[in-house]
Image (tube, rainbow, N blue to C red):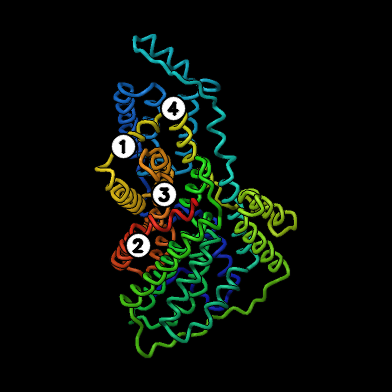
Amino acid sequence: MRFPAPFSSALNTVRLRRFAGLLSQFGTDRIPGLRFASRPGSRRTILIIVTLGLAAMTYAIGRMFLEELAARALAIFVVVAIFWATETLPLFATAFLAVGMEIIFLASDGGLAEQITGALRGVGLSAETGRSIDYTVFFGPFAKDIIFLFMGGFLLSAALTKHGIDVALASRLLQPFRRSPGMLLFATIGITAFFSMWMSNTATTAMVLAITGPLLLALPESGRFHRGLILGVAFGANIGGIGTPIGTPPNAIAFGALNAAGYEITFLSWMLVAVPLAFILMLVAGTILYRAFPPAPDLEIPAIENDEPITGRGWMTVLILLATVALWLTSGWHGIRPGAVALLAATALTSLGLLDRHDVDSIDWNLLILMWGGLSLSVAMRETGLSDLIATVEIGGAAAQGWVLALIVTAVAVTMSTFMSNTATAALLMPMALALSIEPREQYAMLAALACSFAMSMPVSTPPNAMAFATGNVPIGSMIRTGTIVTLIGAIIVLAGYQVMLPIVFS
């Protein structure tokens, strides 16, 4: 059995903590060093040329039946979708590109929309924008409540890692379950999922793999139980992210987009629906992994060692976390927006010296930029009237529309997230779901966000999957078989109950 060097130091808790902290800086969207191959420059150039050609064709066809600005927005959408799907550019670079193109091609005030229209008329092409868009509407999403909510979550995660709270709590919580391999597997999934509700799933996976690394080294190489335990960490991190609006970026994008569209969703109402779903999926994942990788009858699990006490600064961090969570859960009563609560938490962490400048610099700013790019696409579609085209979609008869559309949304979200960033998938699907004329569109948007977290089949599907695969102890076939079963069952469960459970969020 082989593990990266940090896993093999059984008693060096400081090294394990530093490893978890290092991985937490890699971002929740892609893990550097775990990419299968870098994209050759010539191939990237070809992709860019092909994408621009497709965008030009889309614009030329679109302006036949759309308003001028809507046709331009559709072409921008094509460029962003292809670049995010193929990672022709880094995901955050494409987000910057999206905002830049929106300002240049769509904004009459602060952009070049009118000048481009005049140039088209000059070559004999009729072009009437019919709308006046100020460039600042595309900057606006970066100041949305959800950006600050997620930023606060990143800072809380950084503080938990820096002061060893995550390692101390997780190791103490896992210790009582080591006497039974089955209980240890379910406990690992559950504890990983719990931390993933509040922390980056990348940092959570790194932390739990670091804690269980020495334990896994003591297991016999002839058995297969260690594979189930490693996959349990990855699946637990994926599943736990469903539980809260800050648990995973697709949730945050949906939370922000829905509130911006006028659907008032509270932190607590989201959890009332998502936590039971996550709990069911944890039981499903644990059962599948236990049956696929059963422990030997006489397997003995060694003790999980962590003797470092929680410091005074650590307890201060815990108090700030508990106060923040309490304010998030009661936001419907006191009226303070979740983003403002996150800002208060960030103020407390930095003012009390629990986080320094380097800690603030290390959070996933690239992911916040990616979310900004996705939210700005929603603004572009709304401001140009492109969303009006999507609103004309009709599917089957009235009685079948709801279920058929729910199936399509779930299938598309799961399929796209399996092979590309689930954050980028959510950013692309959210404006389309909210533009549908078929009610209840808000439920389809949330359904898409949840389904983006179900993709667990491939190493590239999620960062936790990539990290589990990178240990070298999980064959890709094992991940595909077990991950696909969990994905399909999760999709079936959410489709079976979405008409009953999702209305709770919007009540």
Question: How busy is the neighbourhood of tag 2: few (under 14 within 10 Å), some, or many (20 plus)?
Answer: few
Residue 443 tag number: 3
Q: Residue 62: x and y, percent?
A: 32, 25
> Residue sitting at 56 percent across and 40 percent down?
142
Q: Earlier in the sequence, mark 3 or mark 2?
A: 3
Q: Nearer the viewer, residue 428 or 164?
A: 428
Establish if 447 lies above or below 20.
above
Q: Nearer the viewer, mark 1 or mark 4?
A: 1
Q: Residue 350: x and y, percent?
A: 71, 54
> Residue sitting at 42 percent across and 69 percent down?
282
User: Do callouts 3 and 2 mark residues in contact (Cβ within 8 Å)?
Assistant: no
Q: Residue 58: x and y, percent?
A: 31, 28
Query: Spatial distance from mark 3 to mark 2, Cα to Cα?
Result: 15 Å
Q: Earlier in the sequence, mark 1 or mark 3?
A: 1
Q: Earlier in the sequence, mark 4 or mark 2?
A: 4
> In the rendered structure, which amino acid carries the disc numbered 3?
Gln
Residue 36 tag number: none
Query: Spatial distance from mark 1 to mark 3, Cα to Cα?
Result: 16 Å
Query: Spatial distance from mark 3 to mark 4, Cα to Cα?
Result: 24 Å
Q: Earlier in the sequence, mark 3 or mark 4?
A: 4
Q: Nearer the viewer, residue 219 or 369?
A: 369
Query: Spatial distance from mark 1 to mark 4, Cα to Cα?
Result: 18 Å
Which residue is label 2 attached to?
A: 493
User: Do callouts 4 and 2 mark residues in contact (Cβ within 8 Å)?
Assistant: no
Q: Residue 178: x and y, percent?
A: 48, 83
> In the rendered structure, which amino acid carries the disc numbered 1?
Val
Label 2 element class = helix
Q: Can you say which quadrant of the picture contains the N terminus?
A: bottom left
> In the rendered structure, which amino acid carries the disc numbered 4?
Thr
Residue 384 tag number: 4
